[in-house]
Amino acid sequence: MSPWIPMSEHAERRRRLMETMAQDSIAILPAAPERTRNRDVLYPFRQDSDFQYLTGFGEPEAVLVLIPGREAGESVLFCRERNPEKEQWDGSITGQDGAIEAFGLDDAFPVNDIDDILPGMIEGRSRVYYPLGRDQAFDARVMDWVKQIRSKVRAGAQPPGEFVALEHLLHDLRLYKSAKEIKVMAEAGRISAEAHCRAMKRARKGGYEYQLEAELIHTFMEHGARNTAYPSIVGSGANACVLHYIENSAPLDEGDLVLIDAGCEVDCYASDITRTFPVSGRFSEPQRAIYEVVLEAQYAAIDAVQPGHHWNMPHEAALEVLTQGLIDLGIIEGPLAEALEKEAYRPFFMHRTGHWLGMDVHDVGDYKVGDAWRVLEPGMVMTVEPGLYIPPDNMDVDPQWRGIGVRIEDDVVVTKEGCKVLTDAAPKNIAEVEALMAE
């Protein structure tokens, strides 16, 4: 059971989803499968985000079925039966009674009986909502159930005539976070901010990138966040110019910057923070110059996160500042409008300024509706993460800039009045960073 999201909220999510489904339809959603790491060792289990969103049920070998209008109950869960011998080895199993009592499902059956029971639930429904293509093995089982119904058409069976992507309806619901979701994301952001602070302090001792990663994981665990939201990036020196660098094995040299992109996960909700700081505790003049451009770009982008603005406006705001900054530093040529049109910034800033954030670090939700950028609305949560990366082997720029990589990232929720930064406990202006590292 989640300490953050109550059973009633999961039930409300299922109700809202079923309201958008066709009257004579059925939705089928399997839990995440367990995956083998090597030989007989499994990877730590993490529930499928869609399944977690609708149920809060954290066990594998389960299938959620939603049947609007079913008299015996619209929300049905197939899950493992209680097994004292198995529980002796692997821990407690919720079972069918527990699924109804603790998770508020209307009905529950043993998952081993699904082949006998579910085809009868599908039969007579004209439309099936299902995440086709995500799990090939389960796709094959669903097709077998449909074939089983089709084989009985002469006896009056009515197979479904249409499959619709469940994500089309469900992911639009997930895009808008409730007050409780924002609260748990703020907690994940608080823990992650503290982890970044501890890593900054640890960097003064020198050592290796993985020792800073150890500070992050220690802080996450210490506060009950058992998982990272994604593999932590700890890139020092030129490694900061590699966007998804995760080797984290290089030494920390006194004159280098360190870029850390890391966040924990709390109750399946992600945080995502990037901070860049000097190993020595003091920025050099070239490092300071690049950093101040990126920080100004981030402030401009955050100011553009407003209800009624469209999704791309924060990116456009950041691009203007970054491009003008590159011109002012002599790294590219102006004027600004021409540099933007020619994308002269692109060798040094090659990614978007943000992404949706939620149960997935790159969360679900369309960025465009039709051909138009999506309008920002209260409850949407996004990252704001401009950066500049000057490759060490770029001979077209002054040597003082080469090998400097800077990214600054925060998690931002759209509010009725504007926006709120969930991760501002991690310092980012130069004076605050240097003061923290001097402690």
Image: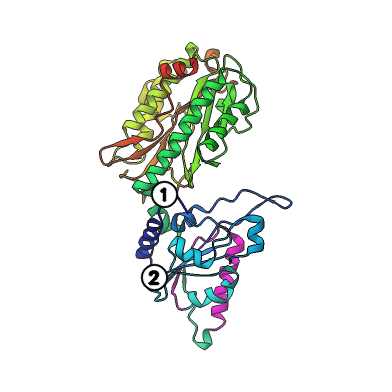
Mark seen at residue 109: none
Q: Residue at x 61, y 55 (%)?
A: 91
**Which residue reaches farthest right?**
39
Judge the density around disc 2: few (<14), some (14-19), many (≥20) Cα neighbours within 10 Å: many
Residue 134 painted magenta: yes
Query: Mark on residue 365?
Result: 1
Residue underneath mark 2: 68
Of residues 352 and 194, which is closer to you in this image? 194
Secondary structure at badge 1 equals loop
- Label 1: few (<14), some (14–19) or many (≥20) C-alpha neighbours in 10 Å: many
Residue 349 appears in view? no
Q: What secondary structure is marked by label 2?
A: loop
Q: Look at label 1 and name its amino acid.
A: Gly
Residue 238, percent across and down? 59, 22
Q: Identify which residue is drawn at 46% across, 61% down.
A: 102
- Up/down of 17 relative to 45, above or below: below
Magenta residues (range):
124-152
The amino acid pointed to by label 2 is Pro
Instruction: Locate residue 241, reporting x and y percent.
Output: 55, 26
Q: Kindly indicate the quadrant of the structure image that contains residue 69.
A: bottom left
